[in-house]
Amino acid sequence: MSKSSRKSELYLISPLNVGGDFPARLERALDAGPVAAFQFRVKDLDQHEAARLAEPLLEICRARDVAFVVNDSVSLAKRLEADGVHLGQSDGDVREAREELGKDVQIGVTCHDSRHFAMDAGEAGADYVAFGAFYPSDTKQTEHQPKPEILEWWQGLFELPCVAIGGITPENCTPLIEAGADFIAVSGAVWNGDEVAAIKAFTEKL
């Protein structure tokens, strides 16, 4: 994931339930418009079960040249040979993850509304930083709510790509795109309804 000459790209995050017909929904979503990356985000599963659920989704992403990023777990990312790992503030150290995963794996870091966290992540060797939640989100409890200005500040100073996350919909994404988000991370806006229509609506805005 790198800064693109296009304005912003879509970064799709999985719902917590990725069983059942979810692989088919993912295929439909990825075929509906350009998606740069897909994040596998499940909670409270042992690694064996998580890997079992991830493998078909990884194949779907690989076939479409979409980066596959594992949320929270460096060991699962390594096991799956994923393209990236996304770390929260309590999920471990960027330098240790880099040592474990090697130089080619993308490492992203959640920085909430903190310029300090973002600069620390950049210095530690992260490949991108994520700010949010910009809007109230059904997917995750919102504790930090930055303003779009934080994206402008980041873009003015740093080469590293930034991701905007949190409650983003086709209706409210424009200020974040204009503020310079390299990637718009979306989950509920896609999976809580018709994924094809949602991806098409985002594509029009991007």
Image (cartoon, grey):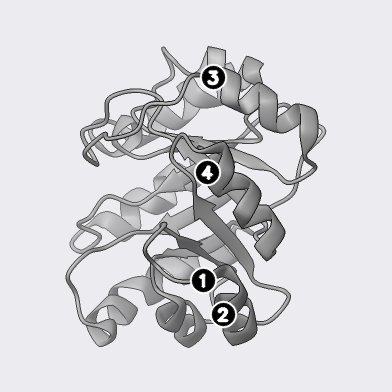
Q: Does any portion of residue 146 appear in the rendered image?
A: yes
Q: Disc 2 marks which amino acid?
A: Glu
Please tell me in which quadrant of the rendered image residue 172 appears: top left
Which mark lies nearer to you, 3 or 1? 1
Q: Residue furthest front?
A: 116
Relative side of 124 to 137, left or right: right
Q: Disc 4 marks which amino acid?
A: Ala
Give percent across and percent down for residue 82: 54, 74
Secondary element at image label 4: strand
Relative side of 66 to 139, left or right: right
Q: In the image, is residue 157 above or below residue 104?
A: above
Give the alpha-carbon distance from disc 3 to disc 1, as whole Å: 27 Å
Mark 1 highlights which residue? Answer: 93
Q: Identify the disc placed on residue 32.
A: none
Say which of 199 and 125 sits in front.
125
Say which of 33 and 113 sits in front.
113
Give the alpha-carbon distance from disc 2 to disc 4, as whole Å: 19 Å
Mark 3 highlights which residue? Answer: 148
The residue shown at (20%, 57%) is 17
Secondary element at image label 3: loop
Q: Please tell me how crowded label 4 is: few (under 14), some (14-19), or many (20+) other residues with Cα within 10 Å.
A: many
Give the alpha-carbon distance from disc 1 to disc 4, as whole Å: 15 Å
Q: In the image, is residue 136 above or below residue 41?
A: above
Give percent across and percent down for residue 5: 82, 33
Q: In the image, is residue 58 above or below residue 188?
A: below
